[in-house]
Structures are given as C-alpha cells and as structure tokens.
Amino acid sequence: MWMRRWCYVTVDEEVVLRHYVEVVLRHYVDEEVVLRHYVDEEVVLHHYVDEEVVLHHYVDEEVVLCHYVDEEVVLRHYVDEEVVLRHYVDEEVVLHHYVDEEVVLRHYVDEEVVLHHYVDEEVVLHHYVDEEVVLRHYVDEEVVLRHYVDEEVVLHHYVDEEVVLHHYVDEEVVLRHYVDKEVVLRHYVDEEVVLHHYVDEEVVLRHYVDKEVVLRHYVDEEVVLHHYVDEEVVLRHYVDKEVVLRHYVDEEVVLHHYVDEEVVLCHYVDKEVVLRL
C-alpha cells in the first residue's frame, strides 16, 4: 500500500525525469516536459515519431529526418535545407516546397518532376543540357538554343524557325531540315552546301547571281540565263545552246564560242561581227 502511494506521489516529478529515462518515456509519451529534457535524443524520437511537438524542438536535426522521411510535417519545418533533400530525392512534396531552388536541381537532375515545376528557367537548362526531356518543355525558347547549338535534337523541335538559323548558320544539319526555305538562303548565301540542297530553285538564283557555284548546278537552264545575261561564265557552261543565243544576240563573246555553227548564223545574219570570224 505504501509503495503504491509513493509511485502515485512521485510520478510527474522533474526529479524522476532526471533519473528514469526509458521508463519516463513509456509514461510521458507526447509530453512537452519530456522533450525539454530529451532534446536531440534518439530515444525520444523512438517514442515521438510523426509528432509536431518533436519538430518544434528538433528543427534541422539529421536524427529527425531519419525518422520522418516523406512527411509533410518535416517539410513545413525544413524548407530550403540540404538535409531534407538528402532524404526526399524524387518526391513531389519536396518540389512543392522548393520551387526555383538551385539546391533542388543538384538533387533532381534529369527528372520529369523537376521540369514540371521549373519550366522556362535558366537554372534548369544549366543542369539539363542535351536532354530530350528539356526540349519537350522548352520548344521555341531562345534560352534552349543558347544551350543546344548544333544538336539534331533541337532541329527536330525547331524546324522552320528564324531563331534556329540565327544559331545554326552554315550547318549541314540545318539544311537537312530547312530545304527550300527562303529563310535559309538569307543566312547561307554563296554556300556550296545550299546548292547541294536547292538545285533548280528560283529562290537560289535570286540570292546567288553571278556565282560559278550556281552554274555548276544549273547547266542548260533558262532560269540561269535570265539572271546571267552577258556573262563569260555562262558561255563556258552553255556552248552550242539555242537558249544562249536567245539571250546573247550580237555579242562578240558568243561568236568566240560559236564559230561555224548554223545556229549562230540563224541569229547573226548580215552582222559585221560574223564576217570577221
């Protein structure tokens, strides 16, 4: 009887807490008084897991996270802490609290979940360069091109965009995607690589007038003469062609190339220039 009364009297005394660690916790679960005495003790967390009261006393402690992994309650107290990310990698709940934080990207590189929260952020590209997942979210953004210049993956998403050419001038990879586009010629004038893709296109001649490189690709085309009248370079490529005479009548340069040709006389009858030859 005396013993029962002693226990009844002494329980809930500060002096007991100082001496009976484990036994006290068994009796004082969820008591502020315990935490005042057990701060940063594994034994407390063993009894207080998932309690707001613990976090109130244990903020920024590795030991808490060890017991609170994936709990909203932790994030409410640990926002912007490296220690949280070490335990919460790849959790939507973290991004909900860490949006636009460099610390997140260091832990979430190449995760769709990050892009879902970080679309149009320079900081993402700094970490995601050359990733298809980025382009799916950044199509038509100057910021992407600054990081993806000369990548097939970009063109796959940016075909026919002025912004691409601004970054890809003189690249074979561009022409594979931009064949027959005025926009390309504005950036590629006088390039063999263009003609390789643009043979027999009016648009090319508008940009390449008087270029040897054009004639190498356009021999015997009316369209060339329309742009090259009275050019020696044309005759070197068009000898004995009716089409030339139609454009070069009464030219010394023609006779130099057409002497003793019926076709010449047909166009030059009674010309002093013919008799000389």
Image: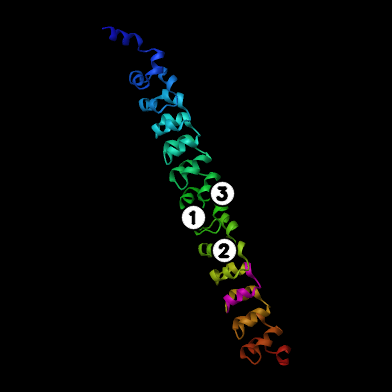
Q: Nearer the viewer, residue 177 or 229?
A: 177
Q: Secondary structure at mark 2?
A: loop
Q: x and y percent of residue 15 in the render?
A: 41, 14
Identify the amino acid type marked 1: His
Q: Nearer the viewer, residue 2 or 218?
A: 2
Tell which circle, 3 or 1, labels the residue nearer the N-terminal end: 3
Tell which circle, 2 or 1, labels the residue nearer the N-terminal end: 1
Q: Secondary structure at mark 1?
A: helix
Q: Nearer the viewer, residue 136 or 240?
A: 136
Q: Pointer 2: what residue?
A: 171
Pointer 3 local density, CA inside 10 Å: few below 14, some 14–19, many at least 20: some
Q: x and y percent of residue 265 in the render?
A: 65, 89
Give me the disc on residue 196.
none
Q: Which residue ends up furthest to the left in the rendered image?
A: 1
Identify the amino acid type marked 2: Glu
> How far apart are labels 3 and 1 at the CA level?
14 Å
Q: Residue at x 61, y 62 (%)?
A: 187
Q: Are marks 3 and 1 in contact (CB under 8 Å)?
A: no
Pointer 2 local density, CA inside 10 Å: few below 14, some 14–19, many at least 20: some
Tell which circle, 2 or 3, labels the residue nearer the N-terminal end: 3
Q: Is residue 259 above or below residue 55?
A: below
Q: Main secondary structure of the magenta part?
A: helix
Question: For the residues carrying marks 3 and 1, which lies nearer the camera in this image?
Answer: 3
Residue 88, quarter of picture? top left
Q: Pointer 1: what residue?
A: 157
Q: Is residue 222 above or below residue 35?
A: below
Q: Pointer 3: what residue?
A: 143
Identify the amino acid type marked 3: Val
Q: Nearer the viewer, residue 235 or 35?
A: 35
Instruction: Say if the magenta span includes residue 214.
Output: yes
